Amino acid sequence: MRNLELPATYSHVLLPAVQELAKDPETRSRLNGYVPGKVGESGLESDRLTGALWAADVWYSIKKHWVVELQQLIRAKRAAGGARASG
């Protein structure tokens, strides 16, 4: 788990309403390219109003956990297949 320091201008009430960000191809590309800890590379750190930094961090975490879950599924299927082949 990690902490993300968000700008003080972000509204805790309105922050989750970021669906409009995905409609702009350039912003969507920046959200997809975001990697925590690479300060300045995504260009999202200067965002003060839209919630883009928060959205990028959440999207990064979702993608990461999809990969972790898929890896577990693949390992489980391989283990089950290996047990059947030897039994």
Image (tube, rainbow, N blue to C red):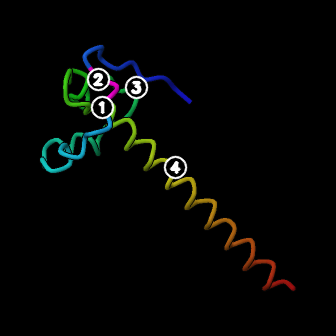
Residue that label 1 marks:
15
Q: Earlier in the sequence, mark 1 or mark 4?
A: 1
Name the residue rendered at 84%, 83% in the picture: 86
Name the residue rendered at 29%, 23% in the picture: 11
**Quick check: 77 above or below 67?**
below
Specify the amino acid type for callout 1: Leu
Specify the amino acid type for callout 2: Ser
Q: Which residues make up the magenta segment? A: 10-14
**Secondary-structure class at tag 4:** helix
The residue lying furthest to the front in this view is: 13
Q: Residues within 10 Å of mark 1 (few under 14, many from 20)?
A: some
Q: Earlier in the sequence, mark 2 or mark 4?
A: 2
For residue 58, side relative to residue 19 (left or right):
right
Q: Quadrant of residue 54?
A: top left
Q: Disc 2 and disc 4: Cα gap in Å?
A: 26 Å
Q: Closer to the camera, 15 or 73?
A: 15
Residue that label 3 marks:
37
- Residue 26 percent location from the top left of the image: 13, 44
Q: Quadrant of the C terminus?
A: bottom right
Asked if labels 4 and 2 touch by Cβ distance under 8 angstroms, the answer is no
Q: Disc 1 and disc 4: Cα gap in Å?
A: 22 Å
**Secondary-structure class at tag 3:** loop
Q: Earlier in the sequence, mark 3 or mark 4?
A: 3
- Residue 39 percent location from the top left of the image: 32, 22
**Secondary-structure class at tag 1:** loop
Residue that label 2 marks:
11
Q: Disc 3 and disc 2: Cα gap in Å?
A: 23 Å
Asked if labels 2 and 3 touch by Cβ distance under 8 angstroms, the answer is no
Q: Report the magenta stretch's main SS.
A: loop
